[in-house]
Image: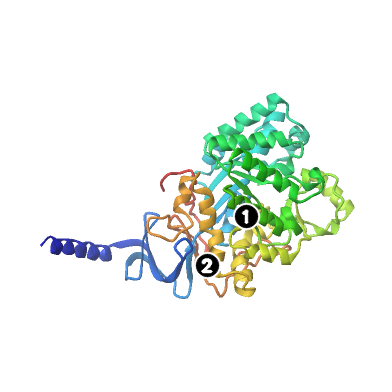
């Protein structure tokens, strides 16, 4: 009798579940969930911003969309998005991104930045606390906010002290206190752009690693320029891996493609070897052979390279010595061409290298195309056209892998990067036969093709391939619950 009663209760519950009407149902899509390896036609039911059911059974929704022939994937997570503004978010949404994080350079003060984004973000957001920003504060007493946007006024006031001045003991202690406060305010770790602060000593960077280890947060680092370490490309990577080994800090090395160039394969072997021996070390790459940064930055101090490989984003022109000097005085974004496509393809194909855009802000129509096309380029060009990696591997590198990189430190990341019951309804729905980047170096402000729908917390930000206006569903990854 007890068995029959239990069966009756199960049957009633099953009928009730079938009868429930959800906020939204995505019907007949090819659901691909890299964590569980699910790749099957399913219906996805969403209510209150969460995925409630992933099922082969019929379910009803107040809104229903037919995803026949389309891939229903977790929303893409970008660990390295400098474009923390509405226009940049809109281009990333059209590229399938649902979470865009500023982890390389970071922000300072963190609390104020998080508050400014609350209720004002198209995509989910978060940031590290900025080593560079803390250095500006320690050397000049200036709060810069997000250091990627150093204004002309700040540059004039702060000068190059933040990049060129060796810190005194007092300044170092002050900087470390500022970093500690930033983590306590919600920083997702510490962001070190040491290539932009060449005066930061090896001891200073080691002290930052010690702090990260003490606080149990990761470091995201743009490694030192090789010319400050004898010109050997591997030496700057060895510096930070050694720091991680000695302190126990978690380490993420940004854009291994642009930092390592022809030494990329050896660098990946080094990182894998460290990981196999118990270190928490990861890396990322973006699928382009050109990088981008500010022309006035320390990266271009004493530049002796080929000026024709530099492209001014405002006009698209290639530079000469004369135009380089002119634009370096005024400041702005420049694209740096010249890397090898064979190495680039190899890096994109590696299953353990996360995809991250390093997308820089859109100023008018000027930017690097990676801010608009990174994810569609991987899935369209490298997966479909070149068959360099499988579709599931490509999705893994842009969903569950970045989520796992963060989830020990960011509570919200535990519900990201998955199409599973009980996770956030951050979902990207695309046509695998049509997805492709449309942005180019001369026309970067172009939305990707083949991205049909994108949801953030169950709300459409892209619907039927068009941006949805009047919605700002993005939330902080620091949040415990949606």
**Residue at 89% from the left image edge and 52% from the top image edge:** 321
Q: Is residue 380 above or below residue 77?
A: below
- Residue furthest to the front in view is 277
Please state the horizontal and vertical placement of residue 148, each as a whole percent of the image. 67, 44
User: Which is nearer the eye, 445 or 290?
Assistant: 290
Q: Residues within 10 Å of mark 1 (few under 14, many from 20)?
A: some
In the image, 318: left or right of 372? right
Q: Is residue 350 above or below residue 134?
A: below
Please state the horizontal and vertical placement of residue 249, each as a whole percent of the image. 59, 41
Please state the horizontal and vertical placement of residue 267, each as a whole percent of the image. 69, 54
Under tag 1, what secondary structure? helix
Q: CA distance from mark 1 to mark 2?
A: 21 Å
Residue 425 falls in which quadrant of the image?
bottom left
In the image, 353: left or right of 412? right
Q: Is residue 14 above or below residue 152?
A: below
In the image, 309: left or right of 277? right
Of the residues tagged 1 and 2, which is closer to the observer? 1
In the image, 420: left or right of 120? left
User: Which is nearer the eye, 426 or 199?
Assistant: 199
Under tag 2, what secondary structure? helix
- Residue furthest to the left in view is 1
Residue, disc 1: 272
User: Could you tell which of marks 1 and 2 lies nearer the N-terminus?
Assistant: 1
Residue, disc 2: 392
**Residue at 58% from the left image edge and 37% from the top image edge:** 212
């Amino acid at each position: 009798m007890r068995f029959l009663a239990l069966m009756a209760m199960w049957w009633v519950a099953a009928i009730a579940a079938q009868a429930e009407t959800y906020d939204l149902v995505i019907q007949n899509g090819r659901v691909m969930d890299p964590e569980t390896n699910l790749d099957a036609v399913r219906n996805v039911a969403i209510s209150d911003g969460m995925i409630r059911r992933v099922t082969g059974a019929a379910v009803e929704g107040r809104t229903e969309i037919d995803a026949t022939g389309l891939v229903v994937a977790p929303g893409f997570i970008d660990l390295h998005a400098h474009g923390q503004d509405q226009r940049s978010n809109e281009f990333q949404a059209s590229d399938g991104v649902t979470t865009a994080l500023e982890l390389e350079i970071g922000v300072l003060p963190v609390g104020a930045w998080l508050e400014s984004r609350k209720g004002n973000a198209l995509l989910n957001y978060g940031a590290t606390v900025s080593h560079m920003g803390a250095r500006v504060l320690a050397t000049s007493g200036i709060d810069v906010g997000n250091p990627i946007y150093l204004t002309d006024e700040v540059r004039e006031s702060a000068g190059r002290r933040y990049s060129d001045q060796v810190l005194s003991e007092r300044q170092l202690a002050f900087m470390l206190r500022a970093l500690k406060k930033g983590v306590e305010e919600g920083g997702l770790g510490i962001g070190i752009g040491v290539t932009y602060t060449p005066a930061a000593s090896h001891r200073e960077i080691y002290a930052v690693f010690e702090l990260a280890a003490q606080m149990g947060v990761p470091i995201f680092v743009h490694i030192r320029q090789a010319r400050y370490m004898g010109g050997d490309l591997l030496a700057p990577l060895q510096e930070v891996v050694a720091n991680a080994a000695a302190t126990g800090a978690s380490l993420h090395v940004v854009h291994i493609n642009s930092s390592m160039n022809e030494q990329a394969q050896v660098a990946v072997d080094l990182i894998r070897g460290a990981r196999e021996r118990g270190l928490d070390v990861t890396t990322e790459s973006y699928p382009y052979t050109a990088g981008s940064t500010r022309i006035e930055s320390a990266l271009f101090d004493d530049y002796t390279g080929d000026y024709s490989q530099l492209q001014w984003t405002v006009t698209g022109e290639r530079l000469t010595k004369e135009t380089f000097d002119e634009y370096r005085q005024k400041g702005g974004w420049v694209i740096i061409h010249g890397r090898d496509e064979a190495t680039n393809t190899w890096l994109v194909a590696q299953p353990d290298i996360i995809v991250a855009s390093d997308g820089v802000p859109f100023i008018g129509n000027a930017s690097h195309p990676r801010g608009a096309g990174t994810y569609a380029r991987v899935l369209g060009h490298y997966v479909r056209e070149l068959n360099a990696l499988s579709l599931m591997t490509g999705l893994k590198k842009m969903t569950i892998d970045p989520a796992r990189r963060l989830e020990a430190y960011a509570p919200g990341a535990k519900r990201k990067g998955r199409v599973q019951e009980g996770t956030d309804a951050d979902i990207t729905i695309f046509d695998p036969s049509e997805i492709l980047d449309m942005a180019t170096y001369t026309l970067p402000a172009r939305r990707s093709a083949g991205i049909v729908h994108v949801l953030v917390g169950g709300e459409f930000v892209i619907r039927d391939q068009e941006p949805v206006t009047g919605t700002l569903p993005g939330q902080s990854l620091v949040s415990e619950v949606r």
